[in-house]
């Protein structure tokens, strides 16, 4: 059954989510994602932006529809150049 409620909810779009809240909201295992980030040579912040599409601003994550994406996303850079060794 499809809901007419907006996703993500407007209150989250306005206030943003902290890193742990974002993982909980999306059903991600925070510790596993932090390990994946480390294995890929990325900060947890950059890794979560890449896999979720949510953008970090002032220590809170916002869905891309709520942000100005003037900069190239970190995951695009990572996919083309790979991690620094």
Image: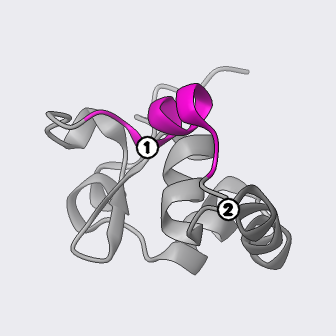
Task: Write the residue at 40% across / 34% down.
Answer: 6
In this picture, residue 14 sits left or right of residue 17: left
Residue that sits furthest to the front in the current view: 85
In the picture, the disc for residue 52 is: none
Q: Position of residue 49 (x, y in %)?
A: 49, 50
| Nearer to us in this view, 6 or 36 | 36
Q: Is 14 colored magenta in this rendering?
A: no
* Label 1 SS: helix
Q: Residues within 10 Å of mark 1 (few under 14, many from 20)?
A: some
In the picture, the disc for residue 41 is: 2
Residue that sits furthest to the top in the current view: 2
In this picture, residue 5 sits left or right of residue 35: left
| Nearer to us in this view, 79 or 30 | 79
In this picture, residue 82 sits left or right of residue 72: right
| Lower sequence index among marks 1 and 2 | 2
What secondary structure characterizes most of the magenta part? helix
Q: Is 76 colored magenta in this rendering?
A: yes
Task: Write the residue at 22% across / 42% down.
Answer: 66
Q: Position of residue 44 (x, y in %)?
A: 59, 69
Task: Tell me if residue 43 comes above or below residue 53 in the rendering.
Answer: below
Please say if the residues under marks 1 and 2 sit with CB atoms less than 8 Å apart: no
């Amino acid at each position: 059954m499809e809901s007419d409620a907006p996703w993500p909810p407007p209150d989250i779009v306005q206030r943003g989510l902290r890193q742990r809240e974002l993982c909980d909201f999306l059903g991600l295992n925070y510790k596993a994602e932090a390990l994946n980030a480390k294995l890929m040579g990325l900060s947890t912040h950059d890794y979560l932006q890449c896999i979720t599409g949510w953008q970090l601003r002032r220590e809170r994550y916002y869905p891309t529809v709520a942000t100005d994406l003037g900069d190239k996303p970190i995951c695009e850079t990572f996919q083309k150049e790979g991690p620094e060794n």
